[in-house]
Image (cartoon, helix red, strand yellow):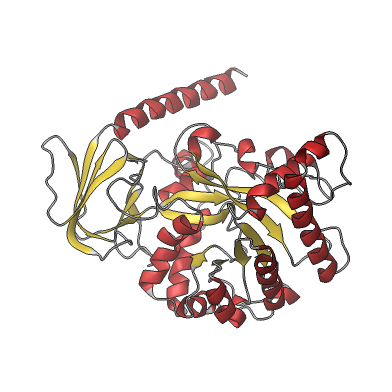
Amino acid sequence: MRYIHNRLSRVFTASAAIAVMSAGASAQTIAITGGRVYPVSSSPIENGTVLIRDGKIVAVGANVTIPADARRIDAAGKWVTPGLINSSTRLGLIEVGAVADTRDATALGHDNVAAAFTAWEGLNTRSVLIGPARREGVTNVVVLPGGNQLVSGQASMLTLIEGMPTDMVLRTPVAMLAQVQSPGGAGVGARGELLVRLRELIEDTRAFMKNRAAYERAETRDYSASRLDLQAMIPVVDGRLPLLVSADKSTDIDAALRIGRENNIRIIIGGGAEAWMIADKLAAAKVPVLAGAMNNIPGSFTQLGSTQENVGLLRRAGVQVVVIGNSGADDEGFNVRNIKQEAGNAVAYGMSWDDALRAVTLTPAEVFGVADRIGSIQAGHDANVVVWSGDPFEFTTVPEHVLVRGREYTEPDRQELLTERYKTLPPGQALPIRK
């Protein structure tokens, strides 16, 4: 017990020190000099400078005056980009999949509708998965509710800083998560019936909006969802909040487009394995698609048309594309950091390099309504900046400096701590030497 107490004391002391460093670092003036700067919102700048003060970018260009007291980061020969955004994660919501006490991604809901569920409020801000993601250049994530219900809950955009959930939330909600491809998950027997339920929910939300006073007096008919779920759906049906619809099969994606068109609802497609088959319709409807580039093999009958060329084909058709993980190797939890490999594979399978960088920086910021804060290197934006040893999409490239709101994160992550711990074994416990 004393051992545990001492270890916890050291952890808490270290955490307090990090908090103090964070406050001090964000007040610094930092100049990243001499690198190839990719603002994303404008053309690349050779031998550029990014000037940061109080956690914000204050200037970027080739001829920026650097204050004498600024800390300098020499980026000569390096590549400088905005922090990466992974737009499909359960980071901080699931720590160990096999341990129920560490799973907070999925709500029970009522009749397969959990629209009021705000998953981010159960966030584990001390998740050991956050450090490795951040150290690999991911500075922002969208956390999605789990489950496969008709409506699973609200998505939120987080910044990977130290603090409580309310400190990390950049914007919430950024979307409402629904699905049109699993009748069983929606508690019905067929796809057509699932769409009937979704239309009924939208119609009931509109009726609830018009008859709220009567509803409170119990003078309305019964609705298909609870009061809180109907209330949460209001921003969706009045067009202020996009409905992020999970759909892989081309006909399911077409159904989602139809629902959006019929009801004047903003739609985002998530997954989109066969989206390339109706790329022209998605482009005409100006519907963004969240899709990955690591998986060429169908995981189900809804993904028979899977191809790694999907995101490139969509982009060339004019669709707004956000690259997410689809490797299936826990890309929403342990491997959130692999988003740069997804983008690199997108380039290998036909997406332009510029589009791939945009698909993990500025485009997700635009799709989720936070482009005035993150996603590009511009004066006035949060100082979420990464200095890479080379092309960020090359496998051997490493992020040498990761700044989030102007603070450089350098503390060792869990993998590094474990490596150090087992480098030297106690006497008598040396590894056997094979002769």
Of residues 257 and 35, which is closer to you in this image? 257
Residue at 44%, 47% (x, y): give it: 134
Q: Position of residue 20 (x, y in %)?
A: 37, 25
Residue 51 sits above or below residue 302 on the image: above
Residue at 30%, 28% (x, y): give it: 24
Name the residue at the top extreme.
2
Q: Position of residue 120 (x, y in %)?
A: 60, 41
Among the 4 quarters of the image, the one containing residue 55 = top left
Residue 178 sits above or below residue 161 on the image: below
Q: Is residue 425 left or right of residue 28?
A: right
Among the 4 quarters of the image, the one containing residue 43 = bottom left
Q: Position of residue 337 (x, y in %)?
A: 48, 55
Q: Is residue 250 left or right of residue 138?
A: right
Residue at 66%, 45% (x, y): give it: 96
Is residue 242 visible in the rendered structure shown here?
yes
Residue 257 sits above or below residue 108 on the image: below
Q: Position of residue 406 (x, y in %)?
A: 32, 40
